[in-house]
Image (cartoon, rainbow, N blue to C red):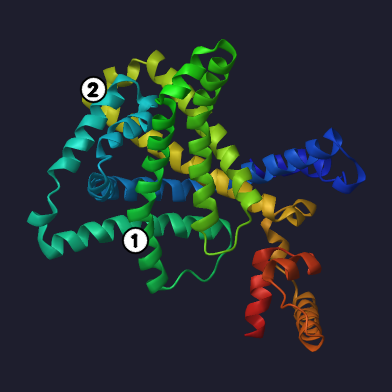
Amino acid sequence: MRRALDNLFLRKIWKYRSDASVGFKKFLPEALRLLYLVARDLLDGQLTLRAMSLVYTTLLAFVPFLAFSFSVLKAFGVHNQLEPLLAKYLAPLGPKGGEITERILGFVENVQVGVLGALGLALLIYTVFSLIQKIENSLNFIWNVRKPRSLAQRFSEYLSVILIGPVLVFTAVGITAAITSTTIVQRLIAIDTIGTGFYLVGRLVPYVLVCGTFTFFYMFIPNRRVRFVSALTGGIVAGVLWETTGWAFASFIASSTKYAAIYSSFAILILFLIWLYLSWLILLTGAQVSYYHQHPHVFTTVGNDRHRFSSAIKERLVLLTMFLVGSHHYHNKEPWTTEALALRLGVSIEAMDMIAEELV
């Protein structure tokens, strides 16, 4: 199937130079190239395998993560907002999503840290950390990061995500609700024109929060500097995919009764696993989009085989790298970054990393 895609798109969309056209004629070939690259990566199977791995880890870490979040939110008095947020995530599952929400929250409330002891608490923390580490490893794979964070960095940053992340999310939701409930705002909403505007903004807020969450993941989780515009582009794409997939999945469940007849009470569990898988796949797809947006030079070549050089070409690239680095150092210029060197030499980031390893 990948070869068929190559034959169909390779000569069609890569023969146009993006700098030779403007406006829509420039956007369309680049959009098709991006679509081709993302589809090719999905068909390669690595993203789907990592999404399935994240599903398994999520099943182990979901309740411990919510338990920590519940404890932190309870200290701020906003723990009651955990249920509507979880219900919103499970909304595509239909009425059964409410049952799953109640059961998960029941498990969370039954987690008593004082009863677990030191070993049980350490196991819970490790389970939560393993989920975040899996997410980081998956995003590092997409961004071709060979060197992960150190153990100390992981501990401090993961702990920040667990403790601060839920507070920021629910604070934003709480502030939005508080603003809309004030007397002045209620009087403004009573005006037809302003009320319509507030209604539209209220409808857009969930989409903005979803896109913002994805953008946060793409900016701070990979162990590489990600530009805000690139992270936002991937976040918007992932947010649109999330809402579209959620609507399609909810429609599928509402119109399908065969699963309940075949799997009986296990049907909702299977559908829950499928929704988890789709959620992680959307996250990884958006990360792939942000990677390609930050590295537009990838659009000039096709295939991941571009970094498999012959010995002569590799030697030439190593010498050119040494010359460029030495020249900047001699003239007291700013040091080269991996991205800048890759763009200067016309190679991919992963190829530049391999060249740099030859010089270490």
Between residue 108 and residue 139, name the one nearer to us.
108
- Write the residue at 26% across / 50% down: 72
Which image quarter holds the N terminus?
A: top right
Disc 2 element: helix
* 296 relative to 286 in the view: left or right: right
- Position of residue 197 relative to residue 242, above or below, is above
- Looking at the picture, tell me which residue is in the foreground, 109 or 293: 109
> Mark 2 belongs to which amino acid?
Ser
How far is disc 2 from disc 1 in space, using C-alphas? 40 Å
Question: Residue pushed farthest top?
Answer: 192
Rendering coords of residue 98 (x, y %): 27, 25
Query: Where does label 1 land, which residue?
Result: 159
Q: Which mark is on residue 264?
A: 2
Q: Is residue 120 left or right of residue 207?
A: left
Q: Which mark is residue 11?
A: none
Task: Count neighbours of disc 2 (C-alpha within 10 A) and say few if under 14, some if 14 to 19, many if 20 or more.
Answer: few
Identify the mark nearer the N-term, 2 or 1: 1
Q: Position of residue 251 (x, y in %)?
A: 44, 18
Q: Amino acid at mark 1?
A: Leu
Within the image, what quadrant is residue 343 found in? bottom right
Q: Is residue 72 above or below residue 340?
A: above
What residue is at 70 percent from the left and 56 percent from the top? Answer: 295
Q: Residue at x 67, y 65 (%)?
A: 349
Quadrant holding the C terminus: bottom right
Q: Residue 32, can we see it?
A: yes
Work out whether residue 43 can be spotted. no
**For residue 118, what is the image quadrant?**
bottom left
Rendered view: 185 above or below 8 = above
Q: Secondary structure at mark 1?
A: helix
Residue drawn at the location 77% of the way across and 54% of the way down: 301
